[in-house]
Every structure is written in structure tokens, then in C-alpha cells.
Amino acid sequence: MNSRHWRVPFLQASRVLEGRNAHPLSGRWALIVLNQPFSRKLFDILWNACEWRVFADGGSNRVRDLLGNEWKSYLPDLITGDLDSIRSDVQQDYTSMDVRVVRDGSLDATDFMKCFDAIKELERRTPQEGDYSVIVLGGLSGRIDQTVHTMSYLYKLRRIRAHVFVATDDDVGWVLDEGEHYISLDRTFLGQTCGLLPVGIESTRLSMKGLQWNWTDHESSLDGDVSTSNWLAADEIWIKTTRPIWWTMSLKLPI
Ligand SMILES: Nc1ncnc2c1ncn2[C@@H]1O[C@H](COP(=O)(O)OP(=O)(O)OP(=O)(O)O)[C@@H](O)[C@H]1O
Ligand SMILES: Cc1ncc(C[n+]2csc(CCO)c2C)c(N)n1
């Protein structure tokens, strides 16, 4: 049976406390900034964790507005998407700083997918350096069709990319493929709440340890039992699932 060990290195207490002084994570990490609200604190944590950053279309407006006068110190490696949401003044600002802006007008792919295409292309050009782990800022809140799209796309990515996390100010989540998962946590800046979400599957059989409410080989489906509003009860969590599920934990970042 497939077995994985997970950490969430970008939420380690030492890094969160270092804030803007934190060094990039070891390994290759990429950040995708979507067009949804986020706090300066979360932005700083994720920006510093990653060595390569892309803004999805209107995500550029969010960063530009959040940073005010400091925006020139946070230039992305790429801005991409259909570019129907980025404001013209924002596009001009970034272009004037030589940021690469690539328009892809396809109506069959979202700006979110276009960002992953850019990461794939970068990996193709530099194969010896290995694949990126990816953090997506935004994507689990806002419009429900976009949220479901995020959930769907990460399901598909699980087969081709080892680490893709989605973070918002409310929570962090990712897909657990069928099999066993050991999740090691630094809970300093995590909230208590977590969820195991059988979305996009008929049903799964779930076992878990380390939570307040644990199941043993229990059937879970949207039409039946779902473990939402569960609580983290240990730093080591174990989950076994017969089908892929979404795992989410709430965040409690300092102001
Ligand atoms: N209201 C929203 N709720 C949730 N996510 C959103 C929302 N708007 C945008 N996003 C995310 O941010 C990305 C960039 O958004 P942007 O607003 O620039 O483009 P869009 O034209 O609305 O989105 P797309 O073209 O991808 O459908 C989207 O691909 C999506 O992942
Ligand atoms: C069956 C089907 N449904 C919706 C779209 C539309 N669509 C999907 S992604 C995208 C780009 C958004 O900027 C658009 C317009 C499609 N092509 N095919």
C-alpha cells in the first residue's frame, strides 16, 4: 500500500516568527498567487519560502495593493493568465520593472492551470534541478466554481507532482492519495480544526489516529459520514484512506 510522510515546512514556527527574514526552503519551491484576498503575514511567509513565484492575472492586483510602496521589493518571476483581470496600471508597473508578462487567452484553461503550465515548462528547461513543490496562495474560498476547480485540479496533479499545498488565511489543505499518510505537525500556528473531505469520490474507507474523533475503517462519503470540524490532538497524525481525499487544517497566524 502507498505510504507517504508529510510535513508542512512553510508553517514551522521558527519560519513564521522570522517573517520577512526567513530563508527559502531547501529544495525547489514555487508560489502561485491567485486572485483572492490574503494577509501580509501569510504572503510574507509564502513569499520567503519559495524561490520562484508567479502571479495569476488578477493576483497581481492583490499583491500590488497589499504591498503599497514596497511592491518593487517583491517582483514575481512571471505574471500569466488571460490578463482580463490585471489592472492596466499594475501591468504597466510590473512591465516597467522588467517582470515577464505572458498572456494565454485560452478559454479552455483557467489562469490557475496556466500557472502550473509555466512551472512545468520551467522544469522541462531545467530537468537536472528536479520538480518543484508548489504552494498555491488562495483557491479554497471565494467563488464556489473556482474552489471546486482548485479541488479538482489538485486531485489530478497528485499523480504527477509530489507536493502541492493550498493556503489561505483560514486554512491549509492538500490531497491525500489512497494509502497511508503520516503527517508531522508543528502546531504552533495551526488552529485546532481539521477536516477529511471525501469530495469527488463515491466513498472511501477511513482510519485515523491523532485526532479528537478517530475512525477505524469507517465509510465516509458526502452522502453519508464526513469528518469536518474534527480537532488535531497530536503532532503526529496517521490517516489511511482507500480513495483520495482532501485534508484541511485551520491556520492561526500571528497578526
Ligand atoms: N472569485 C474567486 N474565487 C475564487 N478563486 C478565484 C476567484 N477569482 C479568481 N480566482 C482564482 O484566481 C485565479 C486568477 O483569477 P483572475 O480573477 O485573474 O481570473 P479570472 O479571469 O476570473 O479567472 P479564470 O480566467 O482563471 O477563470 C483564477 O484562475 C482562480 O484560480
Ligand atoms: C465545458 C466547458 N465549460 C466551461 C468552459 C469555459 N472556460 C473554462 S476555463 C475558461 C477560462 C477562464 O478564463 C473558460 C472560459 C469551457 N471551455 N468548457
Image (tube, rainbow, N blue to C red):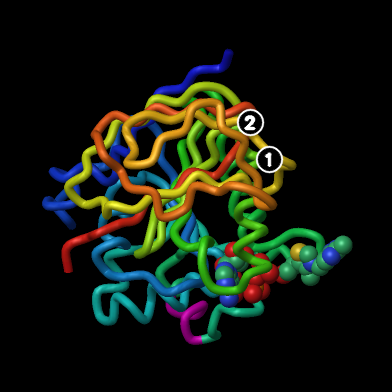
Looking at the image, residue 238 sits to the left or right of residue 202; the answer is: left
Residue located beneath label 2 in the image: 160
Using the image, determine if residue 12 lies above or below residue 97.
Answer: above
Dot 2: element: loop
Task: For the residues labelled 1 and 2, say whether their Cβ atoms are less than 8 Å apart.
Answer: yes
Q: In which quarter of the image is residue 66?
A: bottom left
Measured Cα–Cα span from mark 1 to mark 2? 8 Å
Q: In which quarter of the image is ligand 2?
A: bottom right
Residue located beneath label 1 in the image: 156
Which residue is rendered at x = 55% and y = 48% of the image?
Answer: 226
Looking at the image, residue 119 sits to the left or right of residue 255; the answer is: right
Q: Is residue 134 magenta?
A: no
What span is colored magenta in the figure? Answer: 89-93
Is the magenta region chiefly helix, strand or loop? helix
Place of residue 227 in the rendered image (x, y in percent of width and height, measured from the top left): 49, 47
**What amino acid is at disc 1?**
Lys
Front residue of 224 and 200: 224
